Image (cartoon, grey):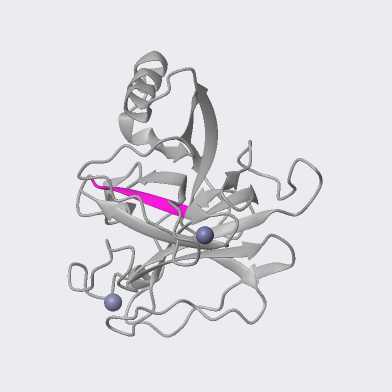
Amino acid sequence: MTTTLLTYAGPADREALVTRTGGVPLAPAGTAWPMCADCEGPMQFLAQFLLDGPARPTARADGPDGPDGSAGLVMALFMCQTDPGMCEAWSPTDGANALRLYPAEGLTPIPAPAAESEEMLFLGEANAVDLAESPLDDYGSAREEWAGVDGRSLRHVLGQLGGRPLWLQADETPSCGSCDRHMDLVAQLEEGPNHATAMNFGGNGTAYAFVCGPCGEGAFLWQC
Ligand SMILES: [Zn+2]
Ligand SMILES: [Zn+2]
């Protein structure tokens, strides 16, 4: 098995229908901005991924159409940053983060709710993503080799698409609430290339987005 790395490709258009970190979330018209179940504040938008279908990331970083010309899905990730450290944003079940799946057609930016600061809602920059195939089958080795060969910073590896999760702590693969099967990893996500605009996974943490394709359910969590 190979590993598909997500690598930093410079600034992204904040509203583009591409796989990116940061920027503005796209969703069907009328979608409400996700709110934290703990503090009831609006969550921070982290990233969106284009998927061929549930749990099937597209083989490229841009273009909304799936391989058969179908529109595919967008997976959007959110996390509470109202008072970082207070709400259990790391938890797959606490309601302080959100993984949403939207059909990738007719999407529009979700209107931003009132918030005390821009930082509560948005990361400081939007990053475009390239995909890099590695022949290595474990993410940890693949990212180190990529950085070594290309002479780039390890921080330019933004994560992986699919594959096997590299756990920093114990294996926390979520089970689907509907069918009870283990969910599939859609993406593992690093904090980002720049400390000033990084996602807050506890400091050098890493996050995991899982989906049960048949049921259309997802779960997001992070470890550090
Ligand atoms: Zn909260
Ligand atoms: Zn299921």
**Residue at 44% over, 66% down:** 177
In magenta stretch: residue 209: yes
Q: Main secondary structure of the magenta part?
A: strand
Q: Which residue reaches farthest front? A: 180
Q: Return the x and y of residue 161 as percentages of the image width and height.
A: 49, 39
Number of marks in the image? 0
Residue 16 visible here: no
Q: Return the x and y of residue 97 as percentages of the image width and height.
A: 36, 68
Q: Which residue reaches farthest right? A: 69
- Residues drawn in magenta: 205-210
In the rendered image, which quarter is residue 83 located in? bottom left
Q: Is 75 positioned to the left or the right of 63 in the image?
A: left
The residue nearer to you, when weighing 150 against 118, is 150
Q: Return the x and y of residue 40 as percentages of the image width and height.
A: 33, 85
The residue nearer to you, when weighing 32 against 181, is 181
**Residue at 40% over, 36% down:** 164
Image height of 152 relative to 29, above or below: above
Q: Is 88 positioned to the left or the right of 22 in the image?
A: left
The residue nearer to you, when weighing 35 against 93, is 93
Image height of 216 relative to 1, above or below: below
Q: Is 127 positioned to the left or the right of 66 in the image?
A: left
Image height of 180 relative to 190, above or below: below
In magenta stretch: residue 82: no
Q: Return the x and y of residue 1 as percentages of the image width and height.
A: 50, 23
**Residue at 46% over, 83% down:** 113
Residue 132 visible here: yes
**Residue at 34% over, 72% down:** 120
